[in-house]
Image: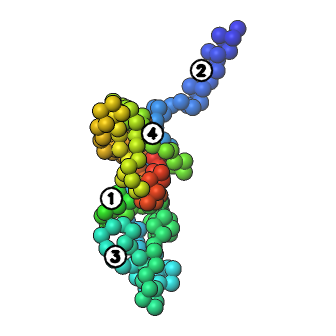
């Protein structure tokens, strides 16, 4: 009798399509919406323009009417100009700030699992205070290897998604997004 109930439940689930998508597939595919209109965003905030004052993503600022510089909230700029959320592809390339749409549920990357899968190393270690300071470490030999966070996110999400840090100076702010 229990077997018949389980068979009927499995048939009903299949008929409803509850498991129609492959494992790891997302109803929210991450999509690049392009770059935010930073100048337009700054003007919408009552400032005169957007200016780049250095060589990192965090060197974008709004210039106020009295010539002061204020930080740009990239996530807000993305939401207000093209939709989505900010993703900095390379902190040291200020042009790599793009806006992405993705699932509202971030997942923390499994750095240790990826290190074990990719290199056979024992653990992931943090060797500094920025998002780029994670490494894989072999505890027997002491060998280190860089963590490719995008690949770690693909591993964590089983083949679908992108990497994103919320704050470059908070190494624990990495997210994997679908």
Residue 84 visible (yes or no): yes
Q: What residue occupies the far right of the structure in this picture?
A: 1
Between disc 2 and disc 1, the foreground one is 1
Of the image marks 2 and 3, the number of the one nearer the N terminus: 2
Q: Circle 2 — which element?
A: helix
Residue depicted at 46% across the width and 78% down the height: 70
Q: Is residue 105 left or right of residue 131?
A: right
Report the residue marked by disc 4: 110
The residue lying toward the viewer, choosing from 77 and 5, is 77
Of the image marks 4 and 2, the number of the one nearer the N terminus: 2
Residue depicted at 37% across the width and 63% down the height: 97
- Density class for disc 1 (Cα within 10 Å; few <14, some 14-19, many ≥20) is few
Between disc 3 and disc 4, the foreground one is 4
Residue depicted at 45% across the width and 72% down the height: 72
Residue at mark 3 to residue at mark 1: CA–CA distance = 16 Å
Q: Is residue 20 left or right of residue 161?
A: right
Report the residue marked by disc 3: 52
* Residue 143 percent coordinates (x, y): 29, 37
Residue at mark 2 to residue at mark 1: CA–CA distance = 47 Å
Q: Circle 3 — which element?
A: strand
Displayed quadrant of residue 59: bottom left
Displayed quadrant of residue 60: bottom left
Report the residue marked by disc 2: 11
* Residue 40 percent coordinates (x, y): 43, 77
Q: Circle 1 — which element?
A: loop
Report the residue marked by disc 1: 90
Q: Is residue 103 left or right of residue 115?
A: right
Residue at mark 4 to residue at mark 2: CA–CA distance = 34 Å
Of the image marks 3 and 4, the number of the one nearer the N terminus: 3
Q: Circle 4 — which element?
A: loop
User: Mark number for residue 128?
Assistant: none
Residue at mark 4 to residue at mark 1: CA–CA distance = 20 Å
């Amino acid at each position: 009798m229990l077997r018949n109930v389980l068979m009927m439940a499995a048939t009903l689930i299949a008929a409803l399509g509850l498991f129609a998508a492959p494992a790891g597939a997302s109803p929210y595919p991450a999509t690049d919406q392009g770059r935010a209109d930073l100048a337009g965003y700054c003007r919408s905030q009552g400032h005169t323009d957007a200016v780049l004052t250095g060589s990192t993503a965090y060197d974008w600022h709004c210039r106020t009417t009295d010539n002061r510089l204020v930080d740009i909230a990239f996530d807000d700029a993305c939401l207000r100009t093209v939709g989505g959320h900010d993703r900095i592809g390379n902190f040291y390339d200020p042009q790599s700030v793009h806006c992405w749409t993705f699932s509202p549920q971030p997942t923390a990357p499994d750095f240790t699992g990826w290190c074990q899968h990719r290199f056979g190393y024992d653990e992931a270690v943090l060797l500094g205070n920025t998002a780029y300071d994670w490494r894989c470490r072999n505890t027997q030999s002491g060998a280190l290897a860089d963590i490719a966070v995008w690949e770690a996110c693909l591993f964590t999400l089983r083949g679908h998604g992108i990497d994103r840090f919320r704050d470059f100076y908070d190494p624990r702010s990495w997210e994997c997004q679908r």
